[in-house]
């Protein structure tokens, strides 16, 4: 009888402690994620210092959610691939990755996301964070946007308090749950290199709209850029604009 009582007490303690331990582990991962974003902010500043205030953010293939590329199709290095190219995080590549991520497309060094890039032909290497879709990229270079004759990267000094990087966000066809890595919030890094957790209530309504679009572009269902960023309507229901408003 006494043994059964002891076993029962142990079972109760396990039931109480396991959720607490799980929450503590997730809190630790969230903290590590914020630390990664702050470090990426410092690296962006270093890159800007080296390249006349320019930073490698934007999107590829005309798809506003692809600000996560490090290597595209095992051949090109657009967007954050420039940080890899320049060896800015050579000794700490996991800084590119949120430790809470469970989607193999965005986890460090798995078959579907090989490290170091380039991987096999037509296999992408993606970061675990995505960048603000400020400018389009063409293969490994920023694209020239008419009427400009020469391609120019985004200027860090122009971003000020705007959101630059975040946990993977805005993927069409993905549910709100799939894109909320930390469930209750998502982590965001801003142009002043600060990073903070943003309540998912700010983000969820926008992702709910984007989820209705197709990432494959079938029947013209690729979401338009102005659902991701629209500086003419900064108070609209626009993804990166909403993250901007969360900065204080």
Image (tube, helix red, strand yellow):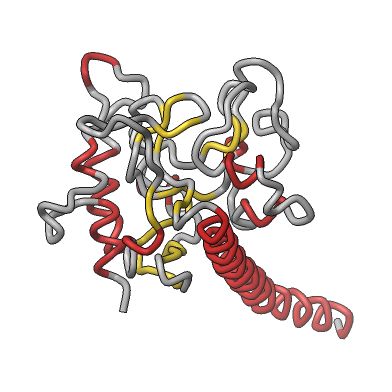
Residue at (20% x, 32% y) in the render? 147
On the image, the x and y values in percent for residue 127 come to: 58, 44
Residue at (62% x, 52% y) in the render? 97
Please state, as top left, top right, bottom left or bottom right, where the C terminus lies in the image. Answer: bottom left
- Determine the image quadrant of residue 100: bottom right
Residue nearer the viewer, 61 or 180:
61
Q: Is residue 177 visible?
A: no
Horizontal side of residue 234 vs 43, given as left or right: left
Up the image or down, 248 lies above or below 76; here it is below
Up the image or down, 206 lies above or below 105; here it is below
Up the image or down, 190 lies above or below 248; here it is above
Please state, as top left, top right, bottom left or bottom right, where the N terminus lies in the image. Answer: bottom right
Residue nearer the viewer, 235 or 182:
235
On the image, the x and y values in percent for residue 16 come to: 65, 78
Q: Is residue 170 visible?
A: yes
Up the image or down, 194 lies above or below 2; here it is above
- Going by the picture, which residue comes out furthest to the bottom? 2
Residue at (76% x, 77% y) in the render? 8
- Going by the picture, which residue comes out furthest to the right? 3
Residue nearer the viewer, 199 or 109:
109
- Determine the image quadrant of residue 222: top left
On the image, the x and y values in percent for residue 9 come to: 76, 82
On the image, the x and y values in percent for residue 117 come to: 70, 32
Horizontal side of residue 45 vs 2, given as left or right: left
Residue nearer the viewer, 118 or 14:
118
Horizontal side of residue 83 vs 229, given as left or right: right
């Amino acid at each position: 009888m006494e043994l059964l009582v002891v076993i029962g007490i142990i079972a109760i303690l396990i039931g109480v402690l396991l959720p607490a331990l799980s929450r503590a582990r997730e809190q630790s991962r969230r903290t590590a994620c914020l630390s990664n974003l702050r470090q990426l902010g410092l690296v962006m500043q270093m890159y800007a210092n080296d390249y006349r205030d320019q930073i490698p953010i934007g999107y590829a293939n005309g798809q506003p959610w692809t600000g996560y590329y490090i290597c595209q199709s095992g051949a090109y290095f657009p967007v954050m691939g420039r940080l890899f190219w320049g060896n800015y995080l050579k000794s700490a590549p996991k800084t590119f990755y949120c430790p809470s991520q469970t989607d193999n497309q965005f986890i460090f060094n798995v078959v579907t996301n090989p490290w170091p890039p380039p991987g096999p032909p037509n296999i992408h290497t993606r970061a675990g964070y995505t960048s603000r879709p400020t400018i389009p990229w063409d293969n490994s270079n920023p694209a020239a946007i008419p009427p400009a004759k020469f391609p120019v990267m985004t200027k860090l000094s122009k971003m000020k308090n705007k959101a630059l990087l975040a946990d993977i966000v805005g993927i069409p066809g993905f549910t709100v749950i799939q894109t909320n890595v930390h469930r209750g919030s998502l982590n965001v890094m801003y142009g002043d290199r600060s990073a903070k957790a943003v309540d998912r209530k700010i983000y969820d309504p926008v992702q709910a709209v984007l989820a209705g679009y197709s990432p494959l572009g079938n029947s013209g269902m690729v979401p338009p850029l102005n659902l991701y960023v629209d500086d003419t309507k900064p108070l609209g229901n626009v993804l990166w604009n909403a993250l901007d408003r969360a900065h204080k």
